[in-house]
Amino acid sequence: MKEEKKVILVTGANKGIGFEMVRQLIKQGHTVILSARHELRGKEAMDKLNQEKLNVHFVLLDLDVEESIRKAVVYVKEQFGRIDVLINNAAILQKQDQSLLQSDWVIIEQTINTNAQAQLKLVRYMLPLLVRGGRILMASSGGGSMTDPVGGWSPAYCISKSLLNAITRHLAYELEGKSITVNAYCPGWVQTDMGGKSAPRKVEQGADTAVWLATAETIPTGKFFRDRKEIPW
Ligand SMILES: NC(=O)c1ccc[n+]([C@@H]2O[C@H](COP(=O)([O-])OP(=O)(O)OC[C@H]3O[C@@H](n4cnc5c(N)ncnc54)[C@H](OP(=O)(O)O)[C@@H]3O)[C@@H](O)[C@H]2O)c1
């Protein structure tokens, strides 16, 4: 039987794990929309893929700007008419994010907004385009876990991912009736601009669980994964 090809949107995909996901998904034959918040960075990423003879689509999408989200939805609707998989990959981790008590409030506010609130906003805007049986994936982190050890690094980032995990579970519940699955995953500690050079994982490994969740024949809903296995919240 011929494998079904999907329309997949990946946010923050001009570099890092998102970019690698796009590459792997195109190689599997899916129609992939690479989104980035800066036009030039997005185009440079597209050029890299085109040099590998991989055909990709692009949409400008800055999660911090509601109008940008709205325009991206209009573009996707006009060009593709639907989305099978939405991968909420984009996030920020700021150097100044050192303490919930000492950091400037703006650091905490921006981090929670971009990494959690804006992700929910994007889902709300994209929902009319998501097909029955569609999938929403949230790039989370062990840092957001309530069972992993807490403390020691980027606390605003960590609590933004805890909130994202909570959003994932509630959305999974609310979207069950539409047969849309919602899951979170941790890519592990990966060598990217965010993860830094000391990280033990390469982007190929970091992208693997999301690519699997996007394409596996069946997946559950409302779960948290790492290395293709369910992990505790
Ligand atoms: N790397 C790790 O070790 C690790 C571990 C656990 C979880 N994660 C998660 O995995 C995901 C990917 O991480 P990564 O390491 O690939 O990060 P990265 O290399 O820093 O890439 C982050 C991407 O998000 C984009 N972005 C940031 N703010 C945005 C906004 N407001 N609107 C749209 N795009 C925005 C960035 O765009 P610009 O290029 O324009 O800045 C970039 O494309 C993130 O959700 C991260 O939290 C990573």
Image (spheres, rainbow, N blue to C red):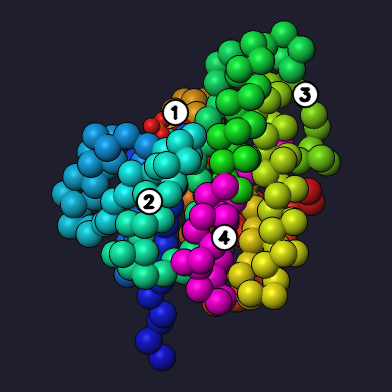
Q: Which mark is residue 151?
A: 3
Q: Is mark 2 within 8 Å of ligand 1?
A: no
Label 1 or label 4, whichever lies nearer to me, is 4
Instruction: State the SS at label 2.
Output: helix
Q: Which mark is residue 7?
A: none
- Say whether residue 187 is magenta: no
Query: Who comes first in sequence, dot 1 or dot 2?
Result: 2
Query: Who comes first in sequence, dot 3 or dot 2?
Result: 2
Q: Which residues are magenta?
A: 121-144
Expressed as whole percent of the image width and height from the top left, the position of residue 12 reads: 42, 42
- Distance between the alpha carbons at the discs numbered 1 and 4: 24 Å
- Distance between the alpha carbons at the discs numbered 1 and 3: 21 Å
Q: Are marks 4 and 3 in contact (CB under 8 Å)?
A: no
Q: Can the viewer see residue 2 in this picture?
A: yes
Instruction: State the SS at label 3.
Output: loop
Q: Amino acid at mark 3?
A: Gly
Q: Which mark is residue 193?
A: 1
Query: Who comes first in sequence, dot 4 or dot 3?
Result: 4
Please tell me which residue lies in front, 150 or 7. 7
Q: Amino acid at mark 4?
A: Ile
- Distance between the alpha carbons at the discs numbered 3 and 2: 36 Å
Q: Amino acid at mark 1?
A: Asp
Q: Is mark 3 within 8 Å of ligand 1?
A: no
Q: Is residue 171 above or below residue 139?
A: below
Expressed as whole percent of the image width and height from the top left, the position of residue 223 reads: 72, 59
Label 2 or label 4, whichever lies nearer to me, is 2
Identified at 23% across, 38% down, the residue is: 44
